[in-house]
Amino acid sequence: MSYADIDAVETTGASEKTSKQDKLSFSGVPASHNMAKTDEGRVKKYKSKIESVAEKTGIDAALIAAIMSRETRAGNVLKDGWGDHGNGWGLMQVDVNPNGGGHTPRGAWDSEEHITQATEILVYFIDRISKKFPTWTKEMQLKGGVAAYNAGDGRVRSEDVDVLTTGKDYSNDVIARAQWYRKNGFPK
């Protein structure tokens, strides 16, 4: 399947709430870019795995890197591979909560197998959003799929895809970080 070009997706970037996590005095796309840059060294440790998964799944490597950055600061906030109070596994936080995603984690928290599983979940949500909103542009379907990766496809109800996501900015922040990663070493 062909997904939208990350550079063509409109984004407002990180909310004030999200940018305050890094004690930034600004929000929006500049804040998302700043956070992506902060995580760059950690993200690049996984570059070959990210690019391998991107090639297998058709998902932009920069988008995978951005989700790692947003979810776990590329592993920096994990405790023994776990985050979200034991509900999320790995760099991309596969939801293991039986009342949430209910996934069984695959691979070590920083393995290509984990990155593949998480990216396959993202693909699943992009496909669900594409079917749910067939008249949306590919860019909006991608953005909606990213929001659904965080909140579930049932919580994406309109083009205001982030209204029920973490920080009310999940897809906007991830997309802005992905655009930064695209310009800084992660190919399509």
Image: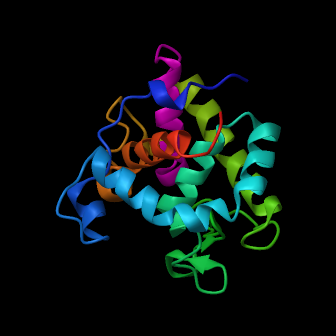
Visible residue check, residue 153:
no
Give the color scheme: rainbow, by chain, secondary structure or one colour.
rainbow
Q: Is residue 136 magenta?
A: yes
Judged from this view, the residue extending furthest toward the top is: 135
Judged from this view, the residue extending furthest toward the left is: 25
Specify the segment rendered in magenta: 133-152
Visible residue check, residue 166:
yes
Q: Quick check: 180 above or below 112?
A: above
Q: Is residue 49 left or right of residue 10?
A: right
Q: Quick check: 166 above or below 91?
A: above
Q: Is residue 168 left or right of residue 154?
A: left
Count of numbered marks: 0
Q: Is residue 24 left or right of residue 8?
A: left
Q: Residue at x 29, y 39 (%)?
A: 12
Q: Is residue 175 left or right of residue 131?
A: left
Quadrant containing the N terminus in the rendered view? top right
Q: Main secondary structure of the magenta part?
A: helix
Percent position of residue 140, x then y? 45, 26
Percent position of residue 81, x then y? 66, 79
Q: Residue at x 57, y 66 (%)?
A: 41
Q: Residue at x 31, y 70 (%)?
A: 22
Q: Nearer the viewer, residue 157 or 149?
A: 149
Q: Quick check: 99 above or below 55?
A: below
